[in-house]
Image (cartoon, grey):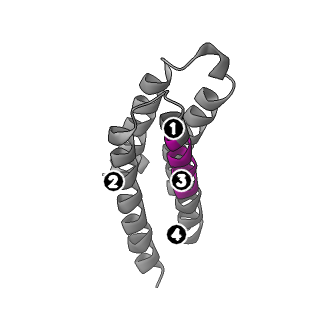
Amino acid sequence: MVRTHKDLDVWKLGIELVEKIYKATIGFPKEEIYGLTSQMRRAAVSIPSNIAEGAARNSEKEFIQFLYISLGSLSELETQVIIANKIGYLDSLDMINSIEILRKKLLNFIKYVKTKIK
């Protein structure tokens, strides 16, 4: 059986996070549709998208590069979640917890992929 990005836990967790972000941002003020709502959704979608794109690449080195892009998007999203919480749009405890779990798994996965290069 051929394994794809859809078999990866980090990709699955990324998809779950996208769903949470979309549901959470539905209630944001309409004036944020092109601001924080859009930025948070784009950052969230970028996480599993880059995992998928990296997995489809030819080499582990390229894959790692895309995993780091996902990690960057995750940090961007975390910052936006904190901002949304500070201005009263979002109760972020569950979201921050999901982000931290995904960050740990992503970092461990990067370490694992790096061992395949050596």
Q: Which mark is residue 60?
A: 4
Label located before the other in sequence (2 or 1): 1
Task: Tell which tag, 3 or 4, sits nearer the viewer.
Answer: 3
**Residue 104 in view in this figure:** yes
SS label for mark 1: helix
* Residue 98 percent coordinates (x, y): 35, 45
Q: Give the range drawn in magenta.
A: 71-82
**Residue type, mark 3 in image:** Ser
Marks 4/1 in contact by CB < 8 Å: the verdict is no
Report which residue position mark 1 lands on. 86
Residue at the spot x=57%, y=35% of the render? 40
Q: Which residue lies furthest to the bottom in this view?
A: 118
Q: Residue 37 carries which label?
A: none
Q: In this view, does 30 lie above or below 101?
A: above
Q: Does the magenta stretch include residue 46?
A: no
Label located before the other in sequence (4 or 1): 4
Q: How far apart are marks 4 and 1 (CA)?
A: 39 Å
Task: Tell which tag, 2 or 1, sits nearer the viewer.
Answer: 1
Q: Which mark is residue 75?
A: 3
SS label for mark 4: helix
SS label for mark 2: helix
Q: Residue 101 carries which label?
A: 2
Specify few, some or many for label 2: CA neighbours under 10 Å numbering under 14, 14-19, or 20 or more.
Answer: few
Specify few, some or many for label 1: CA neighbours under 10 Å numbering under 14, 14-19, or 20 or more.
Answer: few
